[in-house]
Amino acid sequence: MLLQRNKLGSVRPPKRCRSDMDNTSTSDIVIINGNSHPDLANMVAERMGIKNGGCSVFHKSNRETIVEISDSVRGKDIYIIQTGTKDANNNIMELLIMAYACKTSSARSIVGVIPYLPYSKQCKMRKRGCIVSKLLAKMMCTSGLTHIITMDLHQKEIQGFFDIPVDNLRASPFLLQYIQESIPDYRNSVIVARNPGVAKKANSYAERLRLGLAVIHGEQKETDADEVDGRYSPPPTRNSTPQHAPTSSARQRTTSVSVGVPEHIVKVKPPLTIVGDVSGRIAIMVDDLIDDVQAFVAAAEMLKENGACKIYVLATHGLLSSDAPRQLDESPIDEIVVTNTIPHEIQKLQCHKIKTIDISILIAEAIRRIHNKESMSYLFRNVTLED
């Protein structure tokens, strides 16, 4: 091989050598995964044209988690693909131990790819509980993760719980494309929000597809507002009235409560009602998560009673816990479409209505852009807060 000299006399490597050096950047990527979703990890690695790293995660007889990484990770960029499933606690511990093992093995960066973030629904203070997703974020940051890639968080504000960058990808382009290409006569559809909390997301879908919008309002089951515990013990009341009345004009315009602290008015929701016309239309319910399907089944029954000819349910995450497949199979819902952020092959065998959309190409592109230090803005084009 002949070496070329430039005008200053220094040796310049041939073009083939320079191109080989440019292509070595992919060798710095190591993709490992736990036991939550190995199929998704293999699909992402295959799309990127690299081999899945050697990492075995298993449990001892006492249920302790053991992680063994066979390949060297020193100075490399590690991407841990671990999603949340019904075995959320084990999924979390596997992720934390894998991240800490890479940290103590001198990895350059450790990116957690968590398509469905567990405990994301516990992101608000409820009664005497706690904000579990905040605790989980602290644990992930402490374990050594330097970046998080997730998809369709239950609340976008969860990103603020982390002290590291978080990229919250959106699955809405895949679901919108499915509506346009796989639902016959989708122009005769109406986007349905099964409760007012999903109305913004449903409105975003309706505007993009130029379709009508319907909202289901009301409550099917009784709330826990009538539970009796220490929280509802009333403060002591004072029967005596103040002896010295205020004399100044400013105090005369001040209203005081006669008996103690005023009680909050009980919020009573009406029975389920539909705001919007669904008669003779295809009803498409959209949401970010399908877990307990009882609310979806009740909404579908109401849509059927109001004349909907077909009913679809589209969501990003299909957790489908308990006997959800049986309930969906017996319901008037015609089709349930979810992405493969969570494995649900067993549920698909139990219910033939469940369809899957592959989002591995989006995760692979996000990993490639982060590794090459490219902008992520292309993946968020035309994305709004409501998506």
Image (tube, helix red, strand yellow):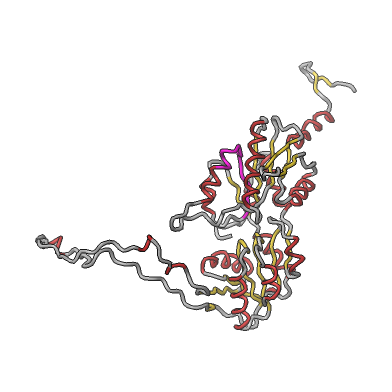
Residue furthest to the right: 1
Image quadrant where one finds the N terminus: top right
In x, y percent, where is residue 354? 72, 67
Residue furthest to the front: 62
In x, y percent, where is residue 175? 68, 63
Direction from residue 66 to residue 19 in the image, left or right: right
> Which corner quadrant of the image does residue 288 belong to?
bottom right
**Relative height, residue 165 to residue 191 (above, below):** above
What residue is at 56 percent from the left and 67 percent from the top? 203
In this rendered view, identify the residue nearer to me: 98 or 371.
Answer: 98
In this rendered view, identify the residue nearer to me: 128 or 71.
Answer: 128
Q: How many marks?
A: 0
- Tell whether position 141 is magenta: yes
In x, y percent, where is residue 272? 52, 77
Image quadrant where one finds the C terminus: bottom right
In this rendered view, identify the residue nearer to me: 299 or 326.
Answer: 326
Direction from residue 384 to residue 9 in the image, left or right: right
> Which corner quadrant of the image does residue 20 belong to?
top right
> Which corner quadrant of the image does residue 2 belong to?
top right
**Relative height, residue 57 to residue 321 (above, below):** above
In this rendered view, identify the residue nearer to me: 33 or 303.
Answer: 33
- Tell whether position 47 is magenta: no
In x, y percent, where is residue 172? 64, 60
What residue is at 67 percent from the left and 32 percent from the top? 107
Residue span colored magenta: 139-151
